[in-house]
Amino acid sequence: MDHFIGFDRLLRVHVGREKEIVIVGPAGIAAAVGHKLHAYRWDLVDRYATDLAFYVIEVHAADRLDALRFRLKTRFA
């Protein structure tokens, strides 16, 4: 939980802005970010002309990274 303190505020400040936020963390961080974003109803997305994206990079080992992008315009799918 301590790693997500402030995430709601970060999200609130950046919704409505054209921005990409990069998050790097251990295996499982992308699922955690995805669950956090899906905790909200995104029924007002069409009101925003801009797109906010979270680019999440998971570090599995020194030679293996996985990445996902969650976009506001797709309701963070």
Image (spheres, grey):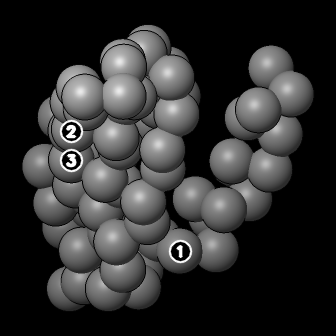
Estimate how packed mark 1 is, as few (under 14), some (14 to 19) or many (20 or more) residues with alpha carbons within 10 Å: some
Name the spot of residue 15 as percent of width and height, x first.
47, 71
For this rendering, which residue is in front, 42 or 71?
A: 71
Residue displayed at 86% across by 28% down: 2
Residue displayed at 73% across by 35% down: 4
Q: Secondary structure at mark 1?
A: helix
Quadrant showing the C terminus: top left
Look at mark 1 in the image and give the residue it sits on: 14
41 lies left or right of 2: left
Image vertical order of residue 67 relative to residue 31, above or below: below
Residue displayed at 30% across by 62% down: 53
Estimate how packed mark 2 is, as few (under 14), some (14 to 19) or many (20 or more) residues with alpha carbons within 10 Å: some
Name the spot of residue 11 as percent of width and height, x first.
58, 59
The amino acid at mark 3 is Arg
Look at mark 3 in the image and give the residue it sits on: 69
For this rendering, which residue is in front, 60 or 75?
A: 60
Q: Do the residues under discs 3 and 2 have CB atoms within 8 angstroms?
A: yes
Q: CA distance from mark 1 to mark 3?
A: 16 Å
Look at mark 2 in the image and give the residue it sits on: 68
Residue 18 can be seen in this image: yes
Q: Earlier in the sequence, mark 1 or mark 3?
A: 1
